Image (cartoon, rainbow, N blue to C red):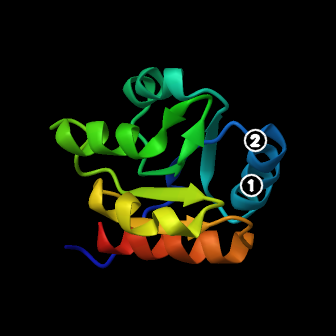
Amino acid sequence: MTNTTLTNPSILFADDDEDLLELAKLKLSKSGFRVRISHNAHNIANMISEERPDLILLDVSMQGIDGRDICQALKNHKATSDIPVIIISGNNDIKNTALMCGADDYIEKPFHTETVKQKIQSMLVQK
């Protein structure tokens, strides 16, 4: 484990709430993160293969696809198992199952961007 932070870390944020994605992208970009957004759970794998993110923010419920299943698939695949994943949900009851599927952390909606930035920075320092 290194205690260095990455310069302009790449974040992939997947959520079907387009307004939330655009706002989060704007605020996180101002903090030095390179943010790519996905409104569709189906193209996450393609986006990861195009440019491997340093961290993934993943909504638990997108267009009928459970983000926990996506997280588990990422964690079970050798090429992506070391990418930190933070699950985001409006339902705090799923926190334990989110962590059990391999998520590195959990954020409950609605959230403050500052909280998200702190969690991202913490994950990247641990990486």
Provide residue 57's location: percent of width, then percent of height: 53, 52
Give 14 or 68, whichever is nearer the viewer: 68
| Res 59 label | none
Q: Residues within 10 Å of mark 1 (few under 14, many from 20)?
A: some
Amino acid carrying label 2: it is: Asp
Q: CA distance from mark 1 to mark 2?
A: 11 Å
User: Under tag 1, what secondary structure?
Assistant: helix
Give 118 or 2, whichever is nearer the viewer: 118
User: Under tag 2, what secondary structure?
Assistant: loop
Image position of 20 (left or right of 101): right
Provide residue 10's location: percent of width, then percent of height: 51, 48
The residue to which callout 1 is attached is 24
Q: Residue at x 78, y 49 (%)?
A: 20
Amino acid carrying label 1: it is: Ala
Give 86 or 89, whichever is nearer the viewer: 89
Image position of 45 (left or right of 87): left
Image position of 102 (left or right of 48): left
| Res 17 label | 2
Where does the C terminus fall, quadrant-wise?
bottom left
Mark yes or no: residue 5 visible.
Answer: no
Q: Residue at x 29, y 53 (%)?
A: 101
Q: Are marks 1 and 2 in contact (CB under 8 Å)?
A: no
Where does the N terminus fall, quadrant-wise?
bottom left
